[in-house]
Amino acid sequence: MDADLVVLETAVVPPKDWEELRRKLKISCGPGGFALELHPKLKPVETTVDGIYLAGFIQGPKDIPDVVAHSGAAASAAIAFMSKGYVESTPYIAFVDEDICSGCGICASICPFEAISIEVEEGRRVAKVDSIKCKGCGACVGSCPSGAIQQHYFTDIQVLTEVEALARG
């Protein structure tokens, strides 16, 4: 076999303390337990957590030029993030209609970003959305049995209107 470079990844596993750190930081995990980037082509060093970037072996086995390239990209992304001086949140965040919220807590338990908490207001439990933590994934919207949670720009009425328009042709 003629080859300039052969890379084997047999028996390579993430560091022992990685799982605990990953859970604390809420970083997604891909096959083999390695960190998962936000998008492999468009955002290869970004995570679902603002301000946390990936480089090197934590994404899986890499050769030296790949590690150097990812490290430079992660450093550039971190500098760009810090130089802005503020964090942009997604406009598609969830919101709660407190009048119909039953306070069951299903939305809080299903939210992968821990952006929803259940609070007691005027003697009743209601869900509250932290707009900084919410990434607009919509998991809570689909799980709410009372329909109290909606998503900006994706309310039930907006989505149904789009479906009706598509059905009409």
Image (spheres, rainbow, N blue to C red):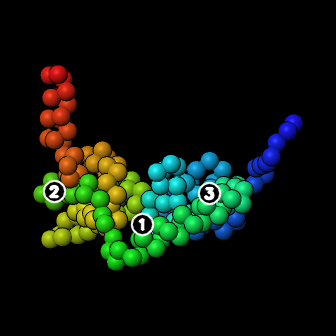
The circle drawn on residue 59 is 3
The Cα–Cα distance between marks 2 and 1, rounded to whole angstroms, is: 27 Å
Q: Where is residue 121 in the image (x, y as percent from the top left)?
A: 18, 70
The Cα–Cα distance between marks 1 and 3, rounded to whole angstroms, is: 17 Å
Query: Could you tell me which quadrant the C terminus lies in?
Result: top left
Q: Which residue matches tag 2?
A: 97
Q: Which of 148 and 20 is in front in this view?
A: 20
Q: Badge 1: few (under 14), some or many (20 or more) residues near its Cα, within 10 Å?
A: some
Q: Taking the image as drawn, is residue 29 in sight?
A: yes
Q: Residue at x 58, y 57 (%)?
A: 35
Q: Taking the image as drawn, is residue 116 in sight?
A: no
The three-letter amino acid code for the residue at tag 3 is Gln
Q: Is residue 141 left or right of residue 157?
A: right
Q: Which residue matches tag 1?
A: 50
Q: In this view, does 148 lie to the left or right of 114?
A: left
Q: Is residue 61 left or right of residue 49?
A: right
* Residue 164, placed above or below residue 127: above
Q: Position of residue 34 (x, y in %)?
A: 62, 56
Q: Which residue is drawn at 61% across and 61% down?
A: 69
Q: Earlier in the sequence, mark 2 or mark 1?
A: 1
Q: Earlier in the sequence, mark 1 or mark 3?
A: 1
Q: Residue at x 72, y 60 (%)?
A: 64
Which of label 2 and label 3 is nearer to you?
3
Query: Could you tell me which quadrant the N terminus lies in?
Result: top right
The Cα–Cα distance between marks 2 and 3, rounded to whole angstroms, is: 40 Å
Q: Where is residue 11 in the image (x, y as percent from the top left)?
A: 78, 51
